[in-house]
Image: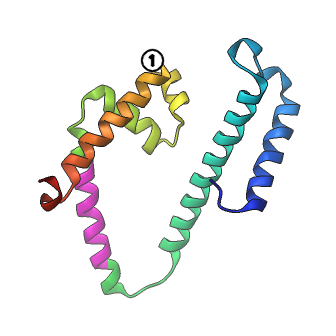
Amino acid sequence: MLANADDARDCVHDVLLRVWQTAGSYRAERGTLRAFLVVAVRNDAISRCRSAARHLAIERRAQPSDVADDVAVDVVRRLESARVRRALESLPPEQRAVFEGIYLHYKTQAQVASELNIPLGTVKSRVSSGLHKLHARLAPEAQRV
């Protein structure tokens, strides 16, 4: 997931250290210790990927480039952003809430499930169904046939 063995080792090390320091966070009635550790490492890896993506995006925006290219890219970006926003607004409110939590607020599916007080499986179903709807709405005309 992290595409780098050193980053993966750091991730596992940091999670194990955090689990050791907060040993009370593990609850045996919620599952095995192995499952708890796997989920903790997975969530930390996701957080690291998202953080790296945000940093990369910031670096790219900070790099100077040709002004004409910037204007063209900005226009295309705004048009696509508006198109995606309209597609998201076309989703039913319960699906939109899940997408906003996951993709706009960078929360895990489990966090969204907890915040919306719905089962994790429901969140997963809403994401799957919503992605199909968004794909159908955003796909170019030639691909819709």
Would you place residue 44 above or below residue 112 in this image? Answer: below
- Name the spot of residue 87 as percent of width and height, x first: 22, 45
Disc 1 marks a residue whose amino acid type is Ile
Q: In this view, does 84 lie to the left or right of 111?
A: left
- Number of callouts in the render? 1
> In front: 131, or 83?
131
User: Residue 32 sits in which quadrant?
Assistant: top right
Q: Is residue 125 above or below residue 99?
A: above
Q: Is residue 74 left or right of residue 107?
A: left
Residue positioned 45% across, 18% down in the render: 118
Q: Would residue 57 appear left or right of 31 to someone viewing this image? A: left
The boundaries of the magenta stretch are 71-84
Q: Position of residue 54 (x, y in %)?
A: 55, 59
The overriding secondary structure of the stretch rendered in magenta is helix
Q: Quadrant of residue 37?
A: top right
Q: Residue furthest top?
A: 29
- Pointer 1: what residue? 118
Magenta span includes 61: no
Q: Which residue is drawn at 53% across and 38% down?
A: 107
Q: Which residue ends up furthest to the front in the rendered image?
A: 145
* Residue at left offset 13%, top offset 61%: 142
Q: What element carries label 1?
A: loop
Report the front residue among 123 and 99: 123
Question: Residue 21, relative to residue 122: is it above or below?
Answer: below
Q: In this view, does 92 lie above or below 133?
A: above
- For label 1, the crowd category at 10 Å Cα-Cα, with few meaning under 14, some 14 to 19 and many 20 or more, is few
In the image, 39 versus 63, the foreground residue is 39
